[in-house]
Structures are given as structure tokens and as C-alpha cells.
Image: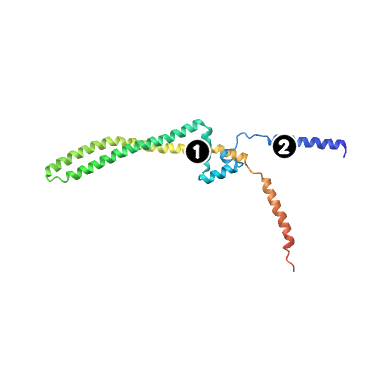
Amino acid sequence: MSSKLFSLLVISSLIIFSCSKKKDNTIPAQPTPEALDEKDNLKESVYSKRYPSNIIDELYEEALTNDPKLKMINNDIALLSEIKSDSMEAYRRYAQNNQSYWASADAYINQLSDSSLKHEMSALFKTLEMKTNERMAKVDAANEVIRQRTQTLNDQLILMKLLVTQPMMSNYQTNEFPPVKTLEHVIMSYDSVISRTKLYTVIKK
């Protein structure tokens, strides 16, 4: 081999090695989400055994750890749910106690033997019940508004989960796309083995 040819081969090898090294060191613009990091097989297997798999929830939980503002909003949503539950329970007990009282009052009124007294007491308690129901109407209206706001906030939470995790999934789809060459090698392996089996599958006539 001539010295010129040898030098050319060495230079070519260095160029190829340098290019491949630069390619290997290329850092993706956005990293793959930890929840979808296929290199961490141990973590993934342990996680899947302990928790039901919901890829959007896993990605969203990861986003919460990386975005303090998003985490604060998510915490406020959970807090609102607790506040609503406590408040609704107080009004529910209030309404239930009132209904129980009016039912008991009617039962006692019906035990009166004097029809005049029965009529008078019935009219009085009906008036008192109507006043209470008028007061409760404001509560019912407020509860209806809270119900509507709850539905709106639930929709917003769903939208946040979808739109926050979509770019994360996009990063995974870009960074972790498996090379087609691997499948092509599998196909070649199949073709090779199939070709070798033909030596033993010839039907002799």
C-alpha cells in the first residue's frame, strides 16, 4: 500500500470518526420525559407494578414537578374541591335537619284532636316552612352556580393535562423514534434462515 493511499485512509477515518462523535454528542432541543425514558427500565417496571398505567397522568405529574406555577394551580384546584365538599356538607345537613323538623311538626299537628287548633297550627308551620324555603332558595341558587363552575374547572383541568403533556409526548416521539435499520436487520435474519431451511424442505419426486 502506498504512503499516499495509507494517509488518505487515515484522514478519511478521522473525518468519519469526528462526524460520528459530533452526531452522538448532539443534545436534543427538548429532553425525553422521565416517565417515558426507556433507558430507565427498572424504574418503569417498579412503577407499573405499584400504580395503574395512565400515561397522561404520569406525564402531568412530571410536569408538575418541573413547573411551580402549574403545581400551584393544581394544588388550588384540589383545595377548592375540599372547600366545596365541606361547604356543601354543612348546607346539606342544614337542609336535612329542617326537612326532618317540618315532617315531625306535621306528625304532631295531625295528632291534635281539636280541628280548629290543628288548622291554625298547620297554617302557622306552613308559613314558617315557606320562609325557611325562601332563605334556602338563595343557597340552592349559589349551589347551582358552584356546580357550573365545578364543571368548567374540570374541563380546564382536562385541557391542561392534554395541552401540557402533548409537547412532552412530542419530544418522546422525536427523540425515541426507533431506527428502522433494526427491523431491516431482523428481516435479513428471517430471509437468511428461510433460505437455509429450503435445503431441507425440497419435496423429492
Residue at 71%, 54% in the rendered image = 191
Q: Is 103 left, or right, of 158 in this rendering?
A: left
Q: Is 23 left, or right, of 79 in this rendering?
A: right
Give the residue number, with chain letter if any, for mark 1.
Answer: 161
Q: Please, what is the three-letter code of the amino acid marked with disc 1?
A: Lys
> Alpha carbon of mark 1 to alpha carbon of mark 2: how far?
38 Å
Residue 61: percent from left, percent from top: 51, 37
Q: Find the residue positioned furthest to the top.
A: 69
- Examine the rendering and report whether any part of residue 149 can be seen: no
Q: Which one is earlier in the sequence, the residue at label 1 or at label 2?
A: 2
Residue at 84%, 37% in the rendered image = 6
Residue at 31%, 35% in the rendered image = 139
Residue 188: percent from left, percent from top: 71, 51
Give the residue number, with chain letter if any, for mark 2.
Answer: 20
Single out the mark in the foreground, 1 or 2. Answer: 2
Residue 83: percent from left, percent from top: 38, 35
Quadrant of image for the N terminus? top right
